[in-house]
Amino acid sequence: MPSLSRRGLIGAAATAPLLFAGAARAADPELPNLAAGTQPIGAEERKARLARAQALMAKHGIGAVLIEPGSSLVYFTGVEWWRSERLTAAILPVEGDPCIVTPFFEEPSVRETLGVPAEVRVWQEDQDPLAITAGFLRDRKLAGKPVGVEETVRWFAVEGLQRALPGVRIVSANPVVRGCRMAKTAPELALMQCATDITIAAYRWTAPQIAAGMTPAEIDALMTAATRKLGGEVEFNLILLGEASAYPHGSHQPQRVTPGQVVLMDCGCTVHGYQSDVSRSFVFGEASAEQRKVWHTVRQGQQVAIEAAQLGVAAGHVDDAVRRYYVSQGFGPDYRLPGLSHRTGHGIGLDGHEPVNLVRGEKTSLAEGMCFSNEPGIYLPGKFGIRLEDCFHMTAAGPTWFSTPPSSIDAPFG
């Protein structure tokens, strides 16, 4: 469930005491590097992405697409950069090589991760970077064509381009960017599978070491150490104990492992930028009848979701199917509690949360290559919550799991 920016959310400390973390690192020499041998996205894959983007631009009558630093910039160009008041951006033209616009003094650093043939145009501190952008569009004879703006681009860049290129028609780049990114290719799926395998292996190493009295930070340290040893870059570890598990993103209240209480772990890592997102809920000690019933209902909810996720159906249909089932079990209705207060799932890939979501009203049809989380949790305020989360991808034959959901609250990690 947690998104890209949620490392260290309430209920899970970003760092644990150094002594404890060091002990955890020293305790896992037997864990293999599961990412050894994986390959990052290469030049040929990025070339194919640009070709797909340009075909979609031509189809939708878009002359160029403007992209700021972030996952879409990485996806198309390989450039790993950050956003600041100094604009660095890519312009993908409908024909020819893209252009990177960046401050003069940043050019050498930006080029370090540039993974495609591209023109680089620089601007000095007393210049307008959007005027440089407009100049590229004029030179490519694109000044009179619509410019697609990637959905996370900031307003100052849009307004600046309108000022620098009077009369420019600004449109959404979603048909291009989403059209490419939502359908994962085999190299992308392989990296996501590896990241998931690492998270599952880290869970299996961490769970037996959880002891009464531990804090979320201490469990986080164990999971972090295992994930790194296994070859993953830690993205987030959200650890919720007892009543905190009833609130999907946690609580400010102090938490410690206590017999008979739920332990909810929502963790993920990246391999060459591609993410995993896996949640497990179990009880430390003996589970009560109520905890077992809710756990079993959530596990069946996952099954209802995967069976509903078929090629060609609307993404919202998956969420609808789960809510109908939960109502039949006495939860809800709709988003009411006790029940499922959030969407059934989200897209995933380079970002932890990507379009589109498995949520009521989403009309996008499921298609081959799309990847989603499946996490229809049930939450009982003041008591506990259960969330099981496994991701899947759509194939020509239907949905396929990245990780196999557990079969029992007594064996949550298989």
Image (cartoon, rainbow, N blue to C red):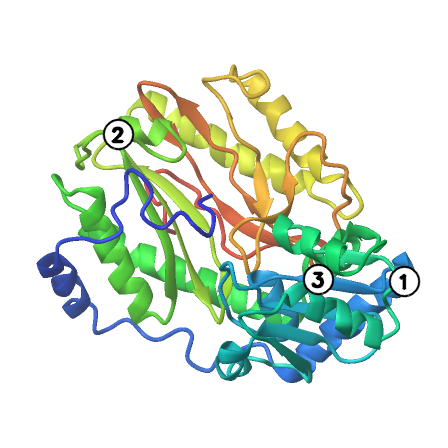
Q: Amino acid at mark 1?
A: Gly
Identify the residue position indicated by label 2 in the image: 242
The amino acid at mark 3 is: Leu
Q: Helix, strand or loop at disc 3?
A: strand
Residue under numbered circle 1: 144
Q: Quadrant of residue 96?
A: bottom right
Quarter assignment of residue 17 = bottom left
The secondary structure type at the circle numbered 2 is helix
Q: Residues within 10 Å of mark 1 (few under 14, many from 20)?
A: some
Indicate the secondary structure of the residue bearing disc 1: loop
Q: Which residue is mark 3?
A: 66
Q: Residue at x 67, y 30 (%)?
A: 360
Mark 2 or 1 closer to N-term? 1
Is residue 203 toward the left or the right of residue 66 in the image? left
Asked if residue 224 is positioned above or below residue 409 in the image, the reply reads below
Identified at 69% across, 43% down, the residue is: 309
